[in-house]
Image (cartoon, helix red, strand yellow):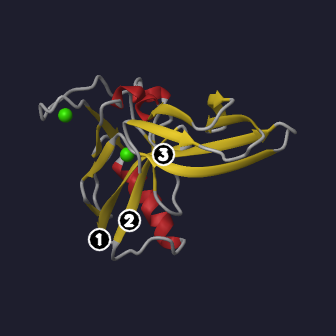
């Protein structure tokens, strides 16, 4: 897991080096005709989740070799409430709360535009119920928070589908993941299931 500002160094011992390139998620971040290449990556400029860092070495004959690594960016903490979910609960819209906290949590505003949804194994995605904003700082630690609400019955239905599919243990816990835009895993939390 990585957060904040990263310094990445790419080096090659190729005597016929033409260029070194550093790509983030396939996009060129920096290049250099000499080795080593060191470049900063500010992970707070992007949402949490998998980030692919690729080094490309090109020699004077035009031969390329590349090496890629996937790291998980984590600048935003995620916690779900309630932590114990009774499948017989009648709670409806806005009765599941996600608390997000991180220096760059404002990247998720406006929340209605980010494709925010909860996912559980084997269940349908549960979309955020409305536009929640702006950020606050309830615990006064200078790191802003954002609160999202989800429909409890939709989450229960997703968990029941996962149980039926054999992917969720009805007597155990389920990993609930908050995704943004279908590709950024903002965070996961474990919820205990009762009442199935
Ligand atoms: Ca805070
Ligand atoms: Ca996170």
The answer to whether 119 is drawn above or below residue 191 in the figure is: above
Q: Distance between the residues labelled 3 and 1?
A: 32 Å
The answer to whether 41 is drawn above or below residue 160 in the figure is: above
Disc 3 residue: CB within 8 Å of ligand 2: yes
- Give the residue number, with chain letter if any, for mark 1: 195
Helix, strand, or loop for circle 1?
loop
Helix, strand, or loop for circle 2?
strand
* First in residue order: circle 1 vs circle 2: 2
- Give the residue number, with chain letter if any, for mark 2: 174
| Picture coordinates of residue 106, whole percent (x, y) | 36, 26
Q: Which residue lies furthest to the left in this view?
A: 140
Q: Residue at x 42, y 52 (%)?
A: 177
- State which quadrant residue 43 falls in: top left
- Give the residue number, with chain letter if any, for mark 3: 49
Q: Considering the image in quadrants, where does the C terminus appear?
A: bottom left
* First in residue order: circle 3 vs circle 2: 3
Tell which of 71 and 137 is nearer to you: 71
| Picture coordinates of residue 75, whole percent (x, y) | 36, 40
The answer to whether 135 is drawn above or below residue 63 in the figure is: above
Helix, strand, or loop for circle 3?
strand
Q: Which residue is drawn at 72% across and 42% down?
A: 57
| Picture coordinates of residue 26, whole percent (x, y) | 67, 37
Horizontal relation, residue 66 to residue 129: left or right? right
Q: How far apart are marks 3 and 2 (CA)?
A: 19 Å
* First in residue order: circle 3 vs circle 1: 3
Q: Residue furthest front?
A: 15
Kindly check if marks 3 and 1 are in contact, taking CB atoms under 8 A apart as contact: no
Q: Distance between the residues labelled 1 and 2?
A: 14 Å
Mark 1 or 2: in front is 2
Tell which of 165 and 58 is nearer to you: 58
Tell which of 116 and 89 is nearer to you: 116
């Amino acid at each position: 897991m990585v957060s904040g500002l990263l310094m990445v160094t790419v080096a090659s011992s190729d005597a016929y080096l033409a260029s070194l390139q550093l790509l983030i998620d396939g996009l060129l971040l920096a290049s250099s005709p000499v080795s080593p290449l060191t470049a900063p990556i500010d992970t707070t400029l992007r949402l949490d989740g998998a980030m692919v860092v690729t080094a490309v070495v090109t020699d004077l004959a035009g031969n390329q070799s590349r090496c890629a690594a996937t790291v998980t960016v984590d600048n935003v903490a995620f916690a779900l409430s309630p932590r114990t979910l009774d499948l017989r609960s009648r709670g409806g819209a806005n009765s599941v709360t996600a608390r997000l906290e991180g220096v760059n949590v404002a990247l998720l505003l406006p929340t209605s535009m980010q494709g925010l949804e909860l996912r559980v194994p084997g269940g349908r995605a549960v979309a955020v119920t409305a536009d929640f904003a702006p950020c606050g700082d309830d615990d006064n630690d200078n790191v802003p928070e954002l609160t999202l609400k989800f429909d409890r019955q939709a989450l229960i239905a997703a968990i029941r589908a996962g149980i039926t599919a054999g992917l969720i243990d009805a007597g155990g816990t389920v990993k609930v993941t908050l995704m943004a835009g279908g590709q950024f895993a903002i965070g996961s939390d474990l919820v205990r299931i009762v009442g199935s």
